[in-house]
Image: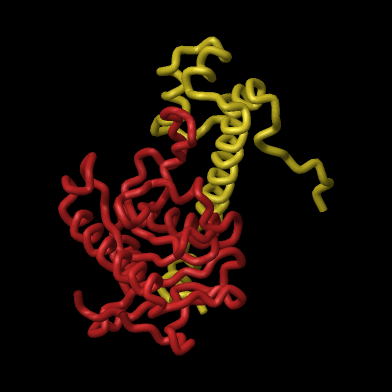
Amino acid sequence: MRSKVAERIQAETPEEVRIFVRQYTDIVLRINELLKARGYTQKDLAEKMKKKPSEINKWLKGNHNLTLKTIARLEAELGEPIIYTSREAVL
Amino acid sequence: MNIFALEIWDDEASKCTFYTVRWEDSIENETDKFFNKYDANPEFKKSTQQLLSFVLDSIGEDHGAIDALFNRFENEVVGLPNKGNVNVSGVVFLYPNFPLRLYALRINNRSDLVVLFNGGVKSAQTNQGSKELYIKWIEACQFAKRIEDALRTKEIIIDNKQRRILSDNRDEEIFL
């Protein structure tokens, strides 16, 4: 069973909202894992990326979403893929 | 503390069963009250939808109640959504300025059993500064303490196979 209230709100939720939340959570958890695995602090990351810690902080903490540019920079620094794009043929 | 029921809120998600609490004299549980209230407010409708998706999709279906998603510790309970604060100094990712908080308790720190309470709008830096939220937080802490006491004294037990909380006579109807 599922709460009727949850069912109703979920049914009214635009699909894009659910896709955003799931993907955003996945991306954040992936970055989280990579940072932990590398043992990086925010300061370390800033040094490696030749940025000010405040700038890194702004990317990660700001009001804006993580941009593709930020993800690409993080991916380059952390040396592992963060997001995959399907290359399967569109049916 | 008055008597309350501990009852299932959602058992359809593949990785986590969600419980809620309902005052004995109330027809509506606390989690439904929270979602109903903020869904009806245009200012918070989208955040309510995001938070519900975070609970049912990201926790319920995708990851379970893992540590990284349950890290906004506020005494006995955890505030959702998580703050994405990883184990390194001060890197904060997820929903840094999210306006709503929903209080939750992971049963025995398991990733598959969570009790959801009520919550509110985070309108100040601290809970104490957000008057309505503060009341819900205090209440959530009281619910959580009572549930944890009941687990300690085996007044309620966990059925691992069914991902369920049961009373000591293995009944699904629980009043604490």
Q: Nearer the viewer, residue A60 or A16?
A: A60
Q: How many marks?
A: 0
Q: Quadrant of residue A62?
A: top left
Residue B138 location, x and y as percent? Answer: 22, 59
Compared across the picture, whether B144 is left or right of B94 comes to left
Compared across the picture, whether A62 is left or right of B24 comes to right
Tell me the quadrant of the picture where the C terminus of chain B can be found.
bottom left
Residue B76 location, x and y as percent? Answer: 32, 57
* Residue with the most extreme front position: B153
- Give the color of chain A as drawn: yellow
Taking the spot 39% from the left edge, 70% from the top edge, the residue there is B152
Compared to residue B35, the image places residue A46 above or below, namely above
Q: Nearer the viewer, residue A31 or B28?
A: A31
Residue B161 location, x and y as percent? Answer: 61, 76
- Give the color of chain B as drawn: red
Q: Nearer the viewer, residue B26 or B67?
A: B67
Compared to residue B153, the image places residue A66 above or below, namely above
Taking the spot 47% from the left edge, 26% from the top edge, the residue there is A59
Residue A66 location, x and y as percent? Answer: 51, 33
Q: How is the image coloured?
A: by chain
Taking the spot 54% from the left edge, 46% from the top edge, the residue there is A25
Q: Nearer the viewer, residue A40 or B63?
A: A40
Compared across the picture, whether B34 is left or right of A67 comes to left
Taking the spot 22% from the left edge, 43% from the top edge, the residue there is B126
Tell me the quadrant of the picture where the N terminus of chain B can be found.
bottom left
* Residue with the most extreme top position: A50
